[in-house]
Amino acid sequence: MQLFVSYARVDKDLADALVADGHALGHHVYYDRDLSGGQRWWDTLLDQIQGAAVFLPVLSDDYRGSQACQAEAGWAAALGIPFVPVVTVEQSPGMYDPVIAEANWISYDPASRGSLADLARGLASAPAVTPPSATPSRPVIPLTYLNTIDRQLREAVEISRGEQLTLISDLRSKLGTRDDRNARDLLATLRARPEITYEAATTIDGLLAAPAAWPPPDPTPTPAVQPVAQPVAAEPTPPEPAPPAPLPRPKPTASRRGWIRLAVSGVAALVALIAAAVAPWETVDTTYAPRSFGLLEEGGGIPKGLGALALAGVLICIALALVVQLMRTAPVFRAVAATAILLTAFVALIGASVVANDETDSMSWGPVVLAAALVVLAVVTGVPAFNAARRPAA
């Protein structure tokens, strides 16, 4: 007979003993050994519950407060699977749903062989599965608050100073609870990010340096041990403590880098506008004196309509670069914007060289300066996308 054991994380040792006894009775027992996460993990659990003949919840206060355990029990009840609840400490049936409260509870003690016999009788007396007329909809994967923080740390390209301090405050509240270890792991992940500020780094170092406060110490007093007289030996001279390692110099924060990129983009945009609208694009030699024609001037070999269209393309590139800098866009959009700006710079050079291709005309410095300014805009726009692609996935 296939069994499914549902338990809270703190009751894993008890669940291991229950699974071993189930195997000793000749049953096939499934339970979540690793307590990992993700959609594939959740789908596997639901499939195992659907194929089980008996659902064994390990009841405790932690089980009652677990979202995942409640979802597992609700799925088993919807499928008509009989329940055989297992208890090790006193629990009130009125605190549970009727499908658990009205089932035949088993008092279980891993150290007692009588409990093994009770377990065998409880499983033998369990009713058969009564499948529903239609398969119910599957419950969604339960996401706790720490799951949300973990996803933010793995997917965010940059985390600002304010967000860093907010995350630290939220994770600090989980220290000393059942989520102490997970909160410490998330604090270490936040500490390792390249944009971490000095203030946030020192705060995290102080929190991680404190000893873990979970699980709480055993309140049972330790019996006093009579001291045994020992010969007094000369105490060795303690070595001098090593000087504390200096904290790594924090890198520029995300907000500071963003302002630097915005300033560089603004200067490059101004240079591009001057090069497009004012600087000469074609020098025509005459018998009197050389004349220079800007992109929008008449008589320079560039039709006025085409010059206006080219200037509009430059303005679009500048607006695109500034919008990307001001808004927190995804890396893929930054990469597309940088590629479009580079193509515009290339087209500007090619177009100017095609216009100035006879013996009397020659391309002036206007398109060269414009292309250089657009290249700077493309680099500043695409650098965050390159850094995000180079950062390894958590």
Image (cartoon, grey):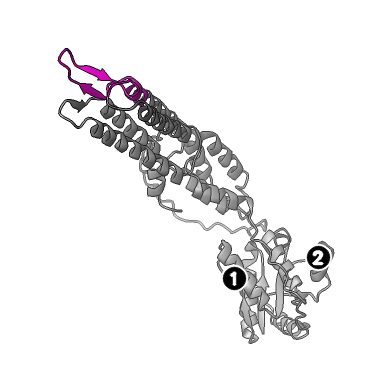
- Left or right: 146 as drawn, with respect to 63: left
Q: Is residue 314 magenta?
A: no
Residue at image x 50%, y 36%? Answer: 200
* Foreground disc of the pair 1, 2: 1
Q: Which of 268 and 2 is in front in this view?
A: 268
Q: Which of 305 and 371 is in front in this view?
A: 305
Q: What element carries label 2?
A: loop
Q: Using the rendered image of the protein, determine whether residue 35 is visible from the camera's viewpoint.
A: no
Label 1 Cα crowd, 10 Å radius (few <14 / some 14-19 / many 20+)? few
* Relative to 386, residue 6 above or below: below
- Left or right: 282 as drawn, with respect to 97: left
Q: Using the rendered image of the protein, determine whether residue 166 is visible from the camera's viewpoint.
A: yes
* Relative to 237, residue 81 above or below: below
How many numbered dots are placed on residues in this image? 2
Q: Residue 386: x, y in percent?
A: 37, 44
Q: Quadrant of residue 308?
A: top left
Q: In which quarter of the image is residue 132?
A: bottom right
Residue at image x 78%, y 85%? Answer: 125
Residue at image x 45%, y 31%? Answer: 319
Residue bearing mark 1: 44
Q: Which stretch is magenta?
A: 271-300
Q: Is residue 280 magenta?
A: yes
User: Which residue is at the far top?
Assistant: 288
* Relative to 326, residue 297 above or below: above
Label 2 Cα crowd, 10 Å radius (few <14 / some 14-19 / many 20+)? few
Q: How far apart are marks 1 and 2 (CA)?
A: 24 Å
Q: Which amino acid does label 2 sit on?
A: Asp
Q: Residue 34: x, y in percent?
A: 55, 66
Residue bearing mark 2: 97
Q: Counting residues from the N terminus, which is met first, the one under dot 1 or under dot 2?
A: 1
Q: Residue 262: x, y in percent?
A: 43, 29
Q: Which amino acid does label 1 sit on?
A: Thr
